[in-house]
Image (tube, rainbow, N blue to C red):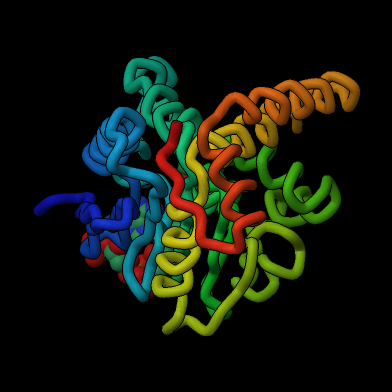
């Protein structure tokens, strides 16, 4: 069975659907490899403008595959090179939206946090329960979660393993917004279509500056923003966007 289903629509939205229902979409090497491959392909495919990743109505991803790591040694874990698979997602220059229904636990919550926008079902179940099986988050959970919700909430979540709903995730700043469960995918796809219709170079610069700037001193980050802003005035899409506004018509962006 294909672990990650993919579908590219004519408007430039690539939908990736994690599909390992027998193990609640747990991340084994197969899922990780296929996800990474799709992200690398999408990076080099100009037809892809935005990526939406999702699971099923019941589960986004219930974490790393516990069966596949229960008996692993540290050296086995090192040799699996999982970092390279995560990097393919983290370094994707195109916008990534996670559409989360059901469980997003451990590596599943970490996977969602690799996205730029998270649309959560109100009743989704988020959490970092690794501590309950004797480990800790290992794919950015302690860092990305703390940056998203602050130290005190992140400590509580990682140290207790307690779960929280999609609605709570949105309230604490982990999800971009929570919507009724049945509307998650359509909301994510609609958001993706909106972004796909924007000028691609501007979108790419927003992502790059926001991510790079988040870990830089404010003055450096503001300079990054200024340089990217100025650079956009060399794009045809900037001329088109402003000209269209002045002429009271819809802009036609070409990504140049
Ligand atoms: N791994 C493997 N199998 C899993 C799984 C998981 N994380 N989650 C569920 N399954 C399997 C179950 O074992 C069961 O398999 P069978 O018994 O049918 O063979 C099947 O999926 C159905 O699960 P349940 O019977 O448990 O279904 P329920 O609806 O009752 O419960 C649940 C659903 C999601 C609440 C429950 O399955 C659950 O608590 N799952 C484990 C959640 C969890 O603890 N997740 C965190 C895992 S640790 C790393 C980076 C990251 C990580 C590690 C390393 N490196 C870079 C090295 C991340 C670690 C984690 O995520």
Give the percent coordinates (x, y) of residue 19. 23, 58
Q: Is residue 224 visible?
A: yes
Image quadrant holding the C terminus, namely top left
Residue at 37 percent across and 29 percent down: it is: 85
| Left or right, residue 233 beside residue 154 | left
Count of marks, rendered view:
0
Residue at 32 percent across and 51 percent down: it is: 12
Vertical comparison of 242 with 229: above or below: below
Q: Quadrant of residue 58?
A: bottom left
Vertical comparison of 91 with 238: above or below: above
Give the percent coordinates (x, y) of residue 64. 40, 45
Image quadrant holding the N terminus, namely bottom left
Residue at 41 percent across and 66 percent down: it is: 189
Residue at 64 percent across and 62 percent down: it is: 176
User: Relative to the observer, which residue lies in front, 217 or 157?
Assistant: 217
Point out the residue furthest to the front here. Answer: 247
Q: Quadrant of residue 42?
A: top left
Vertical comparison of 106 with 234: above or below: below
Point out the residue furthest to the right here. Answer: 219
Give the percent coordinates (x, y) of residue 16. 30, 53
User: Relative to the observer, which residue lies in front, 197 or 172?
Assistant: 197
Point out the residue furthest to the left here. Answer: 1
Q: Quadrant of ligand 1?
A: bottom left
User: Relative to the observer, which residue lies in front, 187 or 243?
Assistant: 243
Q: Is residue 139 visible?
A: no
| Left or right, residue 177 beside residue 64 | right
Vertical comparison of 160 with 180: above or below: above
Give the percent coordinates (x, y) of residue 231. 65, 23
């Amino acid at each position: 069975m294909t672990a990650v289903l993919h579908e590219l629509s004519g408007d430039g939205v690539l939908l990736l659907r994690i599909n390992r229902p027998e193990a609640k979409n747990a991340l084994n090497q197969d899922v990780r490899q296929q996800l990474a491959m799709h992200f690398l392909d999408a990076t080099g495919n100009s037809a892809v403008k935005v990526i939406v990743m999702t699971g099923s109505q019941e589960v986004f991803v219930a974490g790393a595959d516990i069966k596949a790591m229960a008996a692993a040694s540290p050296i086995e874990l090192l040799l699996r090179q999982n970092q390279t698979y995560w990097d393919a997602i983290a370094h994707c220059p195109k916008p990534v939206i996670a559409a989360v229904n059901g469980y997003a636990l451990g590596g599943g919550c970490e996977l969602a946090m690799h996205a730029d926008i998270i649309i959560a079902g109100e009743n989704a179940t988020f959490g970092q329960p690794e501590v309950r099986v004797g480990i800790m988050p290992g794919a950015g959970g302690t860092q990305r979660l703390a940056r998203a919700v602050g130290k005190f909430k992140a400590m509580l979540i990682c140290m207790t393993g307690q779960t929280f709903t999609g609605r709570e995730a949105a309230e604490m700043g982990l999800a971009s917004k929570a919507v009724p469960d049945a509307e998650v995918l359509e909301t994510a796809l609609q958001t993706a279509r909106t972004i796909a219709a924007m000028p691609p170079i501007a979108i790419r610069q927003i992502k790059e500056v926001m991510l790079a700037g988040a870990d830089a001193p404010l003055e450096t980050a503001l300079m990054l923003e200024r340089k990217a802003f100025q650079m956009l005035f060399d794009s045809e899409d900037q001329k088109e966007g402003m000209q269209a506004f002045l002429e009271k018509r819809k802009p036609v962006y070409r990504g140049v």
